[in-house]
Image (tube, rainbow, N blue to C red):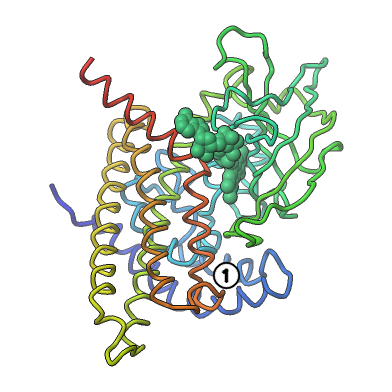
Amino acid sequence: MDFAYPEKTQTLIAQLNAFMDEHIYPNEARYEEELAAGNYWPEVIEELKPKARAAGLWNLFLPESEHGAGLTNLEYAPLCEIMGRVMWAPEVFNCSAPDTGNMEVLARYGTPEQQKQWLQPLLDGEIRSCFAMTEPDVASSDATNIQSAIVRDGDDYVINGRKWFSSGSPDERCKIFIFMGKTDPDNPNRHKQQSMILVPRDTPGITVVRPLPVFGFSGTPDVTGEVRFENVRVPASNMLLGDGRGFEIAQGRLGPGRIHHCMRLIGLAERALEKMCKRTQERVAFGKPVAEQTVTLERIAESRILIDQTRLLVLNAAHMMDTVGNKVARKEIAMIKVAAPNMAARVIDWAIQAHGGGGVTNDFGLAKAYANARMLRLADGPDEVHRNQIGRLELARYR
Ligand SMILES: Cc1cc2nc3c(=O)[nH]c(=O)nc-3n(C[C@H](O)[C@H](O)[C@H](O)COP(=O)(O)OP(=O)(O)OC[C@H]3O[C@@H](n4cnc5c(N)ncnc54)[C@H](O)[C@@H]3O)c2cc1C
């Protein structure tokens, strides 16, 4: 087993680290200031995007596609981790959620016309996108419950439904929704009832009702929202893959989307540990640096163990996705989806404690980082659902 990254990856790691040092870390304070001044989408991001593109640090995700940088999941993992050190950084490299998952859907399942109209501007970072599945009225961790209607009417489909947690929807730059709903509610096969369809944001009948803060933060970093769809009419050619094939697409989308979140969370946890180590060596309490209190040493050591364990699990899942495919790798994907947010939330929580009162303010970025890690125990499916899947797959080995 060779644990070294290939030369191509090492070169990109060096370039990305240099870009982070030159352009991302020095702008962290500015990003927060812009947010605090009421701009949900700080301009610093649009300013930095052309620089990242010019540096060749663009669309680094998208394995097995001519559209991306041509990296495997395994090659992308350490890069995604580095970007994850600053929550808003992935967007600068056009590698942020939910756009990466949505681009992957369009690259895999879109027609050439759909790709030209929506994938290309997304790849160019000109627009953003939204994945609208979850509904306030039903338990959406079981996606067969989704009840929005997509009804055929001549050459069109007419859409009605209420969605929430539609991440990116309040952003004016978000121009396209991938909408999930029922085209065939009476189909005895519950997994054939749903479809996914492209809905341009400016279609009449769409109302972004409100943004939904997460633990009180407007964005962590994506602003999520509630959206109403009332008699929204789109051409039949907007259907993705075909009627009743929504679950097929959902399976394809969530593998890559999930692993990207996990890779980023490792970077976020690394950053929290770094802050914890620096702060506790600077502050003296009861006669010695906080770092030298045994409880702090314990937590620092345990954080290192947890982070490294999780990174190995994530790299293994990435390797499996590259070699045997997302479907066969579903257990490994589910495992990291549970492990990474729990690990990150724990490490960040210890970092908050080590910062004392400062840890819960916005001064150190830890409170928002915690909110992000904690919410990822829900987004893309709650822990329990993934654990159920892991447990069932484990039991099946002995049946
Ligand atoms: C910040 C954020 C961003 C999000 N972004 C998006 C997005 O862009 N697009 C989108 O469509 N959705 C998005 N989601 C929604 C997310 O995927 C759902 O919240 C999640 O799937 C759970 O669905 P639910 O909220 O309806 O919870 P419910 O289905 O009502 O479940 C509630 C709880 O029941 C328990 N539970 C459920 N099933 C089981 C089980 N089998 N065994 C044991 N316990 C169980 C779990 O504890 C679960 O948390 C986002 C969520 C958050 C918090």
> Which residue shows up at 31% across the image and 41% down it?
317
Task: Give the quadrant of ligand 1.
Answer: top right
- On whether ligand 1 comes within 8 Å of the CB at mark 1, the answer is no
Instruction: Quadrant for residue 233, please give it.
Output: top right
> Which residue shows up at 67% across the image and 34% down it?
135
Q: Residue furthest front?
A: 286
Q: Residue furthest left?
A: 1
- Examine the rendered structure and indicate whether residue 112 appears above or below residue 288: above
- Examine the rendered structure and indicate whether residue 372 appears above or below residue 389: below
Question: Residue 43, position in %: x, y?
Answer: 67, 70
Q: Residue furthest bottom?
A: 287
Q: How many marks?
A: 1
- Tell me, yes or no, if residue 104 can be seen here: no
Residue of label 1: 48
- Examine the rendered structure and indicate whether residue 307 appears above or below residue 169: below
Could you say which is closer to the camera, residue 86 or residue 352? Answer: 352
Say whether residue 28 is left or right of residue 171.
Answer: left
**Quarter in which the C terminus is drawn:** top left
